[in-house]
């Protein structure tokens, strides 16, 4: 489960993405335009240390882009080139925001979701000691329901950006579709698919293949 905070962020996540997205080779949109969030889903970090959120955003009437983000309380060693930016969280303090594709915690969570059918984390707020569930803004489903047997993902061995992003780890190869529904990726393997308001039919979001 993912605990959400009723908090403010300065700068906001969308402010960070407005500055960061135009330099990505997979981004189909002009620089300097506002981006809006279409929907999002989250995974759990079993250690409870790293926030893992995947946002689907768009600029004006352009295509939807999938942007996995991780939120950390301290910098991630060796990941400077993947830093989206820093933000001040009114409840948690400074947070370092990374492209999740280069974060081993995200890779492990994505592999688990795809290969075991783990799905997205249930999100909730704490209200006067009670849990108030936050309804998801999209639906995701995995093609595999193989139980909990999954080899440890291990260290990241490489991250290659293109129209999709390839993540290589010790035991699993992952492909993150950057513009879901826009074009076929040619990727194969177990699939994570999703649908949302404006995209009623499910489209591939990511793939996983055990090495």
Image (spheres, rainbow, N blue to C red):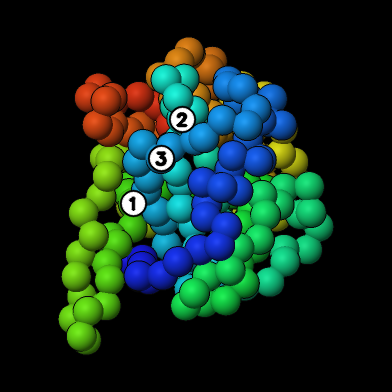
Q: Say left or right for 110 vs 199.
A: right
Identify the residue at image location x=46%, y=46%.
54
**Nearer-N-terminus badge (2/3):** 3
Disc with the residue nearer the chain's start (1 vs 2) = 2
Pinpoint residue 6: horizontal percent, then vertical percent.
Answer: 35, 70
- Residue 201, image x, y percentages: 25, 22
Q: Which residue is mark 2?
A: 58
Q: Quadrant of the N terminus?
A: bottom left
Q: Front-most of 109 and 148?
A: 109
> Is residue 80 among what the camera can see?
yes
Tag of residue 37: 3
Task: Look at the numbered discs 1 and 3 and tell me whether their residues touch, using CB distance below 8 Å.
Answer: no
* Relative horizontal placement of residue 122, taking residue 73 as reference (left or right): left
Residue at numbered disc 1:
120
Disc 1 or 3, which lies upstream in sequence? 3
- Can you tell which quarter of the image residue 191 is in? top left
Most extreme residue toward the bottom is 129
Vertical order, 11 against 163 (above or below): below
Note whether 201 is above or below 72 in the view shown.
above
In front of the other: label 1 or label 3?
3
- Horizontally, residue 112 falls left or right of residue 32, namely left
Q: Quadrant of the C terminus?
A: top right
């Amino acid at each position: 489960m993912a605990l959400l905070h009723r908090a403010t962020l300065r700068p906001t996540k969308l402010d960070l993405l407005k500055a960061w997205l135009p330099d990505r080779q997979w981004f189909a949109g002009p620089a300097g335009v506002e981006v809006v969030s279409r929907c999002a889903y989250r995974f759990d970090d079993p250690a409870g240390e790293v926030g893992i959120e995947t946002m689907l955003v768009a600029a004006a009437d352009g295509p939807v882009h999938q942007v996995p983000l991780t939120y950390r309380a301290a910098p991630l060693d060796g990941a400077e080139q993947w830093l989206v930016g820093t933000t001040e969280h009114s409840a948690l303090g400074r947070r370092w925001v990374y492209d999740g594709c280069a974060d081993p915690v995200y890779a492990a969570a994505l592999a688990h979701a795809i290969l075991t059918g783990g799905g997205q984390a249930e999100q909730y707020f704490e209200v006067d000691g009670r849990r108030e569930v936050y309804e998801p803004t999209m639906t995701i489903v995995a093609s595999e329901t193989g139980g909990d047997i999954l080899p440890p993902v291990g260290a990241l061995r490489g991250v290659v950006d293109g129209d999709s992003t390839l993540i290589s780890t010790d035991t699993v190869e992952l492909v993150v579709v950057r513009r879901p529904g826009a074009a076929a990726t040619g990727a194969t393997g177990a699939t994570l698919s999703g649908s949302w308001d404006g995209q009623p039919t499910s489209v591939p979001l990511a793939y996983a293949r055990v090495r």
